[in-house]
C-alpha cells in the first residue's frame, strides 16, 4: 500500500490520510530526508526559519524543492539545506511568498497610507502582520502602503497595534512579564491554541473563551521570548488580539469569531 509522509516530522501514514495528526500539515508522497542526510559530511548547511509561514506555504516550498531535485530536510518549521543551493532556494522562497500573498482587487477603491516616516524594518513588520491577518496590500512606487478601501478599518487596527509595539519596545516596566523558562511560553501558546481550536468549533464554548482570554492577557504582556524574531512575535500577537477583540465586541459575530479562531489555530500550530 502506498504511504504518505509528513514533510515536517517524517511520520508515515497509510493512503487516505490527508493531514499529519502531530503537525497539522498536508502530507506528501515522498519520504523526507533527515537533516544529517542533506549533502555530504564536508558540505556546509543553512537553516531557514519559516515559523511565520503558513503550513500551506511550507508545503508548497517543499514540493518546489522536491521537483527541482534540491536536497532539504525539516526540523519542525525550520528547513535545512546545503549552503551551495542557497541562491536557487532563495528564488523559490520568493516565488512562494509572491504566490501566497493576498492580492489587491484591481477594480476596488483603494486607500493609500504614507510611509515616509517608517523605516524599512518597520514596513517589513507591517507587511508581515497584514499578511498574517489576510489583508491584501502592496507598496507603490513611492513606498506608500496601498490597501482595499473596504479593509481600511482592519488595517487601522493593525497599524495601531504595530505603532503601540514600536513605541513600547522592550521596556523593563512592571507590566511586562519576563519568563525564564521557554516551556512556560510554549504552555501559554498551547493553551491559547487548544482554546481557539475549541472556539472554532463552538463559538459559545464559554469555558474555552475564558481560557483563551486568560492566556492571551498574559501572552500580550510577555517580553520578546527567546528564539522569536520581533516581526514573528508581532504576527502571533496580532492574530491573538484579533480573536480577543472579536470575543469582546459589543455585538459579537459568530462567523467572525470562528474565522479569527481558525487564524489563531493556523498561526500557533506552526510554533508549538
Image: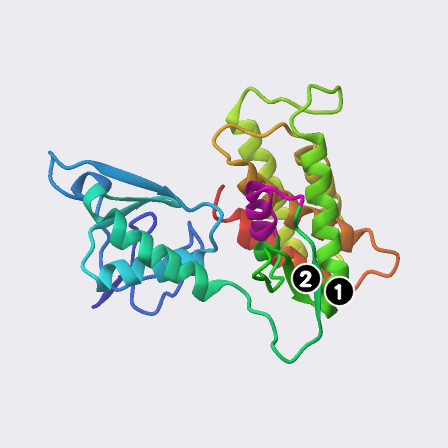
Q: Which element type, helix, strand or loop, lies under badge 1?
A: helix
* Residue 251 falls in image quadrant: bottom right
* Residue 142 falls in image quadrant: bottom right
Q: At 53% across and 34% down in the image, what residue appears?
A: 186
Q: Give the farthest residue toward the front.
A: 142
Q: At 77% across and 60% down in the image, what residue appears?
A: 153
Q: Looking at the picture, does residue 225 appear above or below residue 15?
A: above
Dot 1, how many residues are within 10 Å of its Cα: few (below 14), some (14-19), or many (20+)?
A: some
> Which quadrant does the N terminus fall into?
bottom left
Nearest the eye: 28 or 232: 232
Q: Looking at the picture, does residue 236 appear above or below residue 256?
A: above
Which residue position is annotated with label 2? 258
128 is within the stretch colored magenta: yes
Q: Distance between the residues labelled 2 and 1?
A: 6 Å
Nearest the eye: 59 or 15: 59
Which residue position is annotated with label 1? 254
Is any part of residue 6 visible from this angle?
Answer: no
Question: What's the coloring here?
Answer: rainbow
Q: At 82% across and 51% down in the image, what residue appears?
A: 248
218 left or right, relative to 58: right
156 is within the stretch colored magenta: no
Is any part of residue 137 visible from this angle?
Answer: yes
108 left or right, relative to 19: right
Q: Which element type, helix, strand or loop, lies under badge 2?
A: helix
Region of the chain picked out in magenta, as a range: 117-129
Q: Percent position (x, y) of residue 239?
A: 64, 50
Dot 2, how many residues are within 10 Å of its Cα: few (below 14), some (14-19), or many (20+)?
A: many
90 left or right, relative to 214: left
Amino acid at each position: 500500500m502506498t504511504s504518505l509522509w509528513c514533510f515536517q516530522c517524517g511520520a508515515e501514514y497509510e493512503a487516505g490520510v490527508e493531514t499529519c495528526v502531530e503537525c497539522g500539515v498536508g502530507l506528501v508522497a515522498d519520504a523526507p530526508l533527515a537533516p544529517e542526510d542533506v549533502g555530504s559530511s564536508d558540505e556546509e548547511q543553512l537553516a531557514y526559519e519559516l515559523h511565520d509561514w503558513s503550513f500551506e506555504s511550507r508545503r508548497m516550498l517543499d514540493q518546489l524543492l522536491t521537483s527541482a531535485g534540491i536536497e532539504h530536510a525539516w526540523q519542525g518549521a525550520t528547513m535545512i539545506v546545503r549552503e551551495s543551493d542557497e541562491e536557487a532556494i532563495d528564488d523559490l522562497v520568493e516565488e512562494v511568498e509572491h504566490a501566497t500573498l493576498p492580492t489587491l482587487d484591481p477594480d476596488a477603491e483603494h486607500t493609500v497610507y504614507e510611509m515616509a516616516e517608517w523605516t524599512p524594518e518597520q514596513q517589513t513588520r507591517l507587511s508581515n502582520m497584514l499578511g498574517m491577518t489576510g489583508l491584501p496590500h502592496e507598496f507603490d512606487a513611492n513606498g506608500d502602503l496601498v490597501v482595499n478601501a473596504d479593509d481600511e478599518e482592519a488595517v487601522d487596527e493593525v497599524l495601531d497595534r504595530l505603532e503601540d509595539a514600536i513605541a513600547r519596545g522592550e521596556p523593563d516596566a512592571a507590566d511586562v512579564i519576563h519568563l525564564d523558562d521557554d516551556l512556560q511560553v510554549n504552555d501559554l501558546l498551547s493553551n491559547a491554541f487548544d482554546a481557539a481550536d475549541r472556539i472554532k468549533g463552538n463559538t459559545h464554548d464559554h469555558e474555552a473563551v475564558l481560557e483563551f482570554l486568560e492566556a492571551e492577557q498574559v501572552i500580550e504582556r510577555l517580553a520578546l521570548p527567546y528564539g522569536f524574531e520581533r516581526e514573528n512575535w508581532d504576527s502571533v500577537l496580532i492574530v491573538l488580539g484579533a480573536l480577543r477583540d472579536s470575543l469582546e465586541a459589543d455585538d459579537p459575530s459568530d462567523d467572525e469569531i470562528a474565522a479569527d479562531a481558525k487564524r489563531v489555530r493556523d498561526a500557533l500550530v506552526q510554533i508549538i
